[in-house]
Amino acid sequence: MIQIVDKYIKERYKDNYQQVRDEARLALKTLIARNGKGNDFLGWLDLPDQTPAHLDHLKEIAEEIHRSGDFLVCIGIGGSYLGSKAFIHALYGENHRIKFIGHHLSPLELHDLLDELEEKDFYINVISKSGTTTEPGVTFRILREFAEKKYGDNANRRIIATTDAKKGALRELTRQKGYRSFIIPDNVGGRFSVLTPVGLLPILAAGADMDQITRGAVSGFKFALTDNEDNPALNYVSSRNLCYRDGKAIEIMASMEPRLHYLSEWWKQLFGESEGKEGKGIFPASVDFTTDLHSMGQWIQDGVRNIFETFLVIDHYQKDVIIPADDADLDKLNYLAGKKLSEVNQKAYKGTKQAHEDGGVPTMVIHFDYLDEEHLTKLCVIFEVAVAISGYMLGVNPFDQPGVETYKKNMFALLGKPGV
């Protein structure tokens, strides 16, 4: 179950709540009718693709990688890695068998990975619609050469391409080399692609359960696309837009669980790239509590009041630890003896939320029962529906990203790219 608790914001903005809620409902109707801006990029509403041949091929290769015990090196940037990274980190922590690279241009990180791969067997999953994006393109060129030197003719069997169905440099290279491949649907943008092969191949190769993912998607879309008072996407969007209209231009996503760090990173891309255009949009930021309470906590408590805060809270942990007693009690922590660590973490969350509300920060809470495949998927599709609704409320196209091209043009000119 995913539940949005926004009582504080509803009370604070009670005079305007119904008006904003009605606007959100109209935006939801536009999304369901598929006649709003960017409606040619709504294929994510039909995911995951349940075509048997498609899923069977995907599961077959994922199981091959998982059974082998080899590394899987995923090369991609933005939506081509953040969704799967979020799932894998949430489910397995720092999973040492799934490596992500190609989302930066750091020689240090890539050099260290190459050193590590000298002694390991590995597969490569290169993810790119065009095959010409600089960061993953350069990384793949280096890793492809590395794999070919290590495996010879067998390297092509260890490289899997996720790319356009018919065109682009990576599709052409796939044809030439005979790589196994998957398709990035034309009607699904990168930041919405976690339930396509872009996200599913790494997630399943890490050991995740496809049946749980499917259940989560079906349930999440059912909740998020139904116009009623319990719709978590409508509740979330209504509250965040009320804050935005009151000058709260920054949303801080706060979690008490380090394993949700990359879920927040994925959320930042989803909302930042979808809303931030035409001089509009809420700036998405994130913090990891309690760690960041000893740094950013001061600013949140006493800084400029242009923020609101959304807490991600796991209600039940599948694993827990009991705090022991100590005869000497030098640290004066025996009052916690016998308590579960999750209980202490929960009290830290409640104390933090109350402190920030007292400091003038509007807050809401997203509860989910367990940190598993089903609930993660459900939350992701709720966020996807929510950002589409919110974009329509702002009057922007939630599915394009024209501003991202500017840095590329400048970089190409500085590097002397022909024709630039």
Image (cartoon, rainbow, N blue to C red):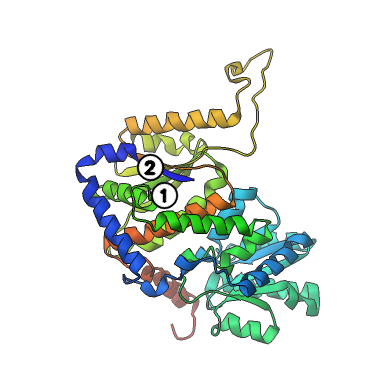
User: Considering depth in this image, is 42 or 115 the residue closer to the camera?
Assistant: 42
Q: Quadrant of residue 62?
A: bottom right
Q: Quadrant of residue 341?
A: top right
Crowd class of label 2 (few under 14; some 14 to 19; many from 20; radius 10 Å): many
Q: Earlier in the sequence, mark 1 or mark 2?
A: 1
Q: Which mark is residue 387?
A: none
300 lies above or below 115: above
Label 1 vs label 2, nearer the camera: 2
Q: Position of residue 64 (x, y in %)?
A: 75, 66
Residue positioned 54% across, 83% down in the render: 168
Residue positioned 77% across, 61% down in the render: 67
Measure how far apart labels 1 and 2 are at the Cα level: 9 Å
Q: Is residue 380 left or right of residue 211?
A: left
Q: Which mark is residue 285?
A: 1
Q: Is residue 296 left or right of residue 20?
A: right
How many numbered marks appear? 2
| Residue 164 is at least partly visible in this image | yes
Q: Outermost residue, top direction?
A: 328
Secondary structure beneath dot 1 equals strand
| Residue 304 is at least partly visible in this image | no
Q: Position of residue 46 (x, y in %)?
A: 48, 67
Residue hosting label 2:
309
Q: Is residue 178 left or right of residue 138?
A: right
Label 1–label 2 contact, CB within 8 A: no
Q: Position of residue 135 (x, y in %)?
A: 55, 69
Crowd class of label 1 (few under 14; some 14 to 19; many from 20; radius 10 Å): some
Secondary structure beneath dot 2 equals strand
Q: Amino acid at mark 1?
A: Ala
Q: Amino acid at mark 2?
A: Glu
312 lies above or below 271: above
User: Considering depth in this image, is 102 or 244 the residue closer to the camera?
Assistant: 244
